[in-house]
Image (cartoon, rainbow, N blue to C red):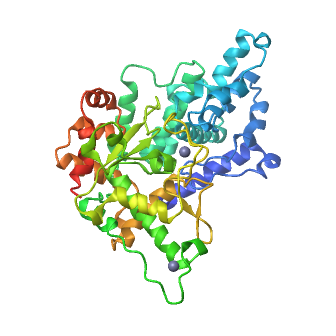
Amino acid sequence: MAGVITEPERLRAQALKGLVLVNLGSGAAAGLKWRPRTTMPTVESLDSLRIMFDRIGADAEYIARVFHSDSRLLALEECRGDWRPVVDKLAQQDPGQESIDSLAAKFRNHVQPLERARGTRQKLETSWNSVVTWAAARDGLKLLLPMSESTLQALLWDAISLGCSLPVLKGLVHAVQARHGHFGLTKPISGDGQYQRLIKSLSRFNGTQHRHVFPIHRDLVVKMLQYEPREHGGGVCDGPGRGCKDCWRSLIEWRNALCGVAHTIGCMRPDEGHNAQLCDWWPEYDTQAGHLEFAGGAALNISQQKNDAGRKGAHKRFGKSTDPSLDFVDQMAQFHGAAGMAVSQRCQKRLRPAERCRYCPPLWPRATRNKRGFDFSKEPTADMVSDWIVAGLGQAGLDTTLFSGVCARRGGLSTAIEAGVPEVITWMQSGHAQEKAARRYVELKSPKLLYATWAAFKL
Ligand SMILES: [Zn+2]
Ligand SMILES: [Zn+2]
């Protein structure tokens, strides 16, 4: 958003930073670091403002509430479903050493913050740092917790005058409200419908249209499935096993194409591709359950989707294509063979599908630094997966400025809707909040409907 900041807005932001420095005093101000790329001036670490709280005589409890932080990756998140060994480590060997207070403290530290996903906690914390920085500039450090509605309005007006977008303004409100909720304080916005009225007043002038990007539709999926390996640029090919550059470039491009196809047909977010492992790919899944009409198909086990706080996961289906040259499931098998990938003998994924497997490689592996191999030890980031989807389209000759990683999911959903796939099924495919209804629906039927989105692509 920094690109659209006007000169007067920039000057006001600088003046606000100046006020923080003056209030902090010359000694402490010297080492102050600002967060880059925030419209609201925000200190990198709240610790640099700690001295000001001592000066205003804030008590220990007040300081603890302002500085409370839960944005780090918690042990029970890091384990990704394999939580029992983690609890074994956190729990006392001897229950006699625990008191009701110490047990409650453990719950509050390790479990309670999980009511919000980690990304949400990180965003709230950044916004909270902006709020505290603002208060440091405006002599308002005593007014933070609890905060009056009037103080919140002052904060929002300053933020508006700096050119903050609606999401930034909402972030400030959410951060203030959440912290009050956490400590059981009365929120500045608490009356019936008051929050909606506030957001309405902000959206009325600050609402913006989304950047339009195209969905990935059937013809683009076909183009990606028609990927042809590169011609070798002369010389002898040693094969990928001996690090042939051209062979590896082809394998990397093929991965991009397959990644784009899977995310489109599976209506997936790049985050799901980032978490997928080779052992989450289950060829002949429904055939094994006796549904022989789905021979040649596969399921992709998604252990956790966005908005899936219950870790219920999903099994996306991919069928066998009528046109053998467009057979995604078959191409996946060929790709994994060519890249030398296999499910580990020690893999326990089928027994515990919700847990991360310690032995198997990522389903879409990242390339090594020299691009002459895949690095199976690290999973790709969600941003990488998003880039690969776009790169897959670029290889197919498309202008990639009109696409982003979300286009895959959007393309899958719109293709399914146009083909008349029942809404509950698309909900389920995409991990929408209403998926509970979808789940009940499909438990009664054969897996046929789960192939409906795949079928809509007519491959
Ligand atoms: Zn080669
Ligand atoms: Zn495994």
Query: Can residue 4 be seen in this snapshot?
Result: no
Q: Residue furthest right?
A: 27
Residue drawn at x 59%, y 42% is 126
Where residue 451 appears, as percent x and y from the top left, is: 26, 44
List x then y, in percent, for residue 399. Answer: 34, 71
Quadrant in which residue 378 is drawn: bottom right
Residue drawn at (78%, 32%) of the image = 55
Asked if 258 appears above or below 316 in the picture, the reply is below
Above or below for 445 versus 279: above
The x and y percentages for residue 50 are 75, 36
Q: Residue at x 52, y 72 (%)?
A: 248
Q: Name the foreground residue: 68 vs 407.
A: 407
Q: How many marks?
A: 0
Ligand 2 position by quadrant: top right
- Is residue 307 visible to us here? yes
Q: Where on the picture, by quarter, is residue 4?
A: bottom left
Q: Which of these two is toward me, 121 or 35? A: 121
Q: Nearer the viewer, residue 48 or 141?
A: 48
Which image quarter is the C terminus in? bottom left
Q: In terms of depth relative to the viewer, which is nearer, 362 or 205?
A: 362
- Which residue appears at 61% of the width and 36% of the height? 79
Q: Quadrant of residue 205?
A: top left
Residue 325 lies, in percent from the top left, at 29, 66
Up the image or down, 163 lies above or below 71; here it is below
